[in-house]
């Protein structure tokens, strides 16, 4: 029988990849990445704020509040890098490079959460890294802004996952999701030039894709947060990210990103083998 955290991670990963596809579709034609980032943070703020109204209030210490605040601040950087990445990079490449977080995550989890990855996990991580290098052509990092943002996002996303796991010890998924959105909703309008004009233009292009994007983002993260409550962080993240094959195939066959198709598929295959080793080998 499949453990519940695996099922939740799979469902969340599928939702995340639909979200990645919609994000690339919405941003590939020159939309404002920061304005869109603020929009779906604001939608999550509303959705999970409403859910919190029906939950029993929790007694939080100053340390708990500090963790939730750090989670929200990290999300500001995460969502900014995510939006910028999708505005510049092919989905079939960025969706693989983002999975480099699987390399950073066990390191951060060891030092911050004292979580030790078994030997086969490190072998799987090495295989993941090889797959990423095959698919992503790391030498292009020096001049390809999209790939540069994807690498930076992978580091910040790994840190975000560790903080989210720490928060799951005392907070409900709804509270975690709400706390993640608060700094972004407040600060983005202040750091954006001509913010009113930019924010009001969000739904002028591809409104259906953007609304679907925000709802899918909320659902996939909610399922992922539940999975982290139940399962080990490295394995949960590996299964969650293992659904990346959907983004690669969508980029190639739907968005017509046909450059270096053989390399992308080879890199995806190698990466999935590594993810299987991390999550399922005993």
Image: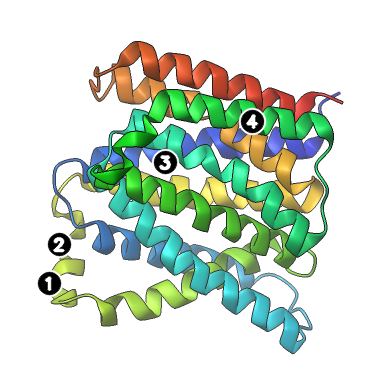
Residue of label 4: 126
Q: Tell me the mark number nearer the camera, choosing from 2 and 4.
A: 4
Residue of label 3: 19
Q: Tell me the mark number nearer the camera, choosing from 3 and 4.
A: 4
Q: Say if 276 sits above or below 223 in the image.
A: above
For marks 3 and 1, the one nearer the N-term is 3
**Mark 2 crowdedness (10 Å alpha carbons): few <14, some 14-19, many ≥20:** some
- Asked if labels 2 and 3 touch by Cβ distance under 8 angstroms, the answer is no
Secondary structure beneath label 3 = helix
Quarter of image, res 256: top left
- Asked if labels 4 and 3 touch by Cβ distance under 8 angstroms, the answer is no
Secondary structure beneath label 4 = helix
For marks 3 and 2, the one nearer the N-term is 3
- Asked if labels 1 and 4 touch by Cβ distance under 8 angstroms, the answer is no
- How many numbered tags mark residues here? 4
Quadrant where the C terminus sits is top right
**Mark 1 crowdedness (10 Å alpha carbons): few <14, some 14-19, many ≥20:** few
Q: Position of residue 151 (x, y in %)?
A: 42, 47
Q: CA distance from mark 3 to mark 4?
A: 27 Å
């Amino acid at each position: 029988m499949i453990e519940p955290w695996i099922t939740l991670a799979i469902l969340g990963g599928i939702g995340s990849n639909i979200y990645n596809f919609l994000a690339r579709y919405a941003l590939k034609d020159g939309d404002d990445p920061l304005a869109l980032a603020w929009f779906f943070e604001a939608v999550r703020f509303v959705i999970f704020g409403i859910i919190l109204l029906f939950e029993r209030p929790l007694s939080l210490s100053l340390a708990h509040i500090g963790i939730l605040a750090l989670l929200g601040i990290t999300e500001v950087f995460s969502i900014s890098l995510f939006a910028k990445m999708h505005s510049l990079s092919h989905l079939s490449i960025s969706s693989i490079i983002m999975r480099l977080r699987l390399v950073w995550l066990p390191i951060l989890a060891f030092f911050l959460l004292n979580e030790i990855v078994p030997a086969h996990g490190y072998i799987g991580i090495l295989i993941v890294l090889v797959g990423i290098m095959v698919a992503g052509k790391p030498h292009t990092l020096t001049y390809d802004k999209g790939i540069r943002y994807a690498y930076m996002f992978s580091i910040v996303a790994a840190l975000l996952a560790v903080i989210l796991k720490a928060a799951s010890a005392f907070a409900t998924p709804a509270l975690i999701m709400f706390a993640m959105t608060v700094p972004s909703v407040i600060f983005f309008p202040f750091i954006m030039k001509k913010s009113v004009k930019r924010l009001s233009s969000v739904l002028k292009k591809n409104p259906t894709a953007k609304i679907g994007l925000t709802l899918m983002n909320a659902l996939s993260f909610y399922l992922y947060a539940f999975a982290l409550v139940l399962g080990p962080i490295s394995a949960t993240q590996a299964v969650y990210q293992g659904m990346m094959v959907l983004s690669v195939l969508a980029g190639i066959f739907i968005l017509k990103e046909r450059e270096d198709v053989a390399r992308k598929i080879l890199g995806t295959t190698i990466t999935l083998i590594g993810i299987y080793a991390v999550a399922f080998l005993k």
